[in-house]
Image (cartoon, rainbow, N blue to C red):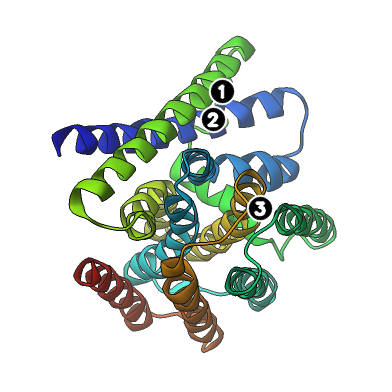
Amino acid sequence: MLVPLIALSAGFIVLIIGGELLVRGAVRVAERAGMSQLLIGLTIVGFGTSAPELVASIEAARAGSPGIAWGNIIGSNLANSLLILGTASLLLPVAVPRGPLWRDGGLALIATVALWVVASTTGVTIAIGSAFLILLLVYLGYAYRAEQTQPAGASAVHEKAEALEVSDTHLHDMQPLWRSILVLFSGIIMIVLGGRWLVEGAVDLARLLGMSEAVIGLTIVAIGTSLPELVTSVIAAYKGASAVALGNVLGSNIFNLLLIGGVTAIVAPGTIPDEITSFGLPVLIGASLLLLIFAATGRRITRWEGGILLVTYLALLVYNVVAV
């Protein structure tokens, strides 16, 4: 029991630190290369802050553990929508721009429903994974054009970048290029190692506890890989940038479904475990609808609505434990 817990804990720590180093190193290198802040936010930051989930899911898929891979994706979105946004709303009611809400929240909901339909019928295929990646590229292109013409109506991915900036006021401090490159590659190495340790520890722990890999993915792995989003959203809410916290969550959900889900489907096509199809995905659809309803009423998520989101997530955790 001790060895899997050590591997799991070490994987979490190394994965999260690696993700932070990857984003900061990549942003600084991109800035020195002359990339705009907008393009950096839409590509490097959006991809980099989803790197822990991406590597963990790919490692799980390659290790023959699709339950952990897909459980991580669905569980991370549940944690984003219920745990993270609920916690942020308790600190400060979250303001909701109506346009980005329906565009970005709607896209995440449509992608979730599409994944559920596919998982319930044919299973995920390379073609489905490719379609998800193409949809992400289309969204990024649309968001880039929209932000160039309407900078006030920022997309979820841009807000995700702002959340990272809010949480680290020294993000853009100048430093030698070689040091930025070193930070970038250090982050990549740590993410790869951390993802491998995390998956190995999670698989061993699931076997020892008699829990299914899907439940481990939906809970332990998902919470661990969502910690960067939790930290940035809570700090953003604490500093009064509550709308940034919402954008951070919506951006993460889009990247998790389209990028990580797409890559996972390509790397390991086949059926999605029944716990994900019959429980995880329907619950995520319900949580997404609940989030949209709360956000649409009064154009803010109030403290009591945030409390409902948080209590719902805790109830899901208890159910998963009891159902084992």
Alpha carbon of mark 1 to alpha carbon of mark 2: how far?
A: 5 Å
**Quadrant hosting residue 201:** top left
Q: Residue furthest left?
A: 2
Residue 86 position, x and y percent, is 37, 70
Q: Are marks 3 and 2 in contact (CB under 8 Å)?
A: no
Of marks 1 and 2, which one's residue comes earlier in the chain?
2
Q: Are marks 1 and 2 in contact (CB under 8 Å)?
A: yes
- Residue under label 1, please give it: 184
Q: Looking at numbered disc 2 in the image, what kind of residue is underneath it? A: Leu
Q: In this orientation, which residue lies closer to the viewer: 11 or 237?
A: 11
Q: Residues within 10 Å of mark 1 (few under 14, many from 20)?
A: many
**Quadrant hosting residue 155:** bottom right
Quadrant, the C terminus: bottom left
Q: Looking at numbered disc 3 in the image, what kind of residue is underneath it? A: Gly
Q: Residue, x 41% and y 56% (percent of image)?
A: 239
Residue 122 position, x and y percent, is 66, 68
Of marks 3 and 2, which one's residue comes earlier in the chain?
2
Please give the label number shown on residue 262: 3
Q: In this orientation, which residue lies closer to the viewer: 159 or 194?
A: 194
- Residue under label 2, please give it: 22
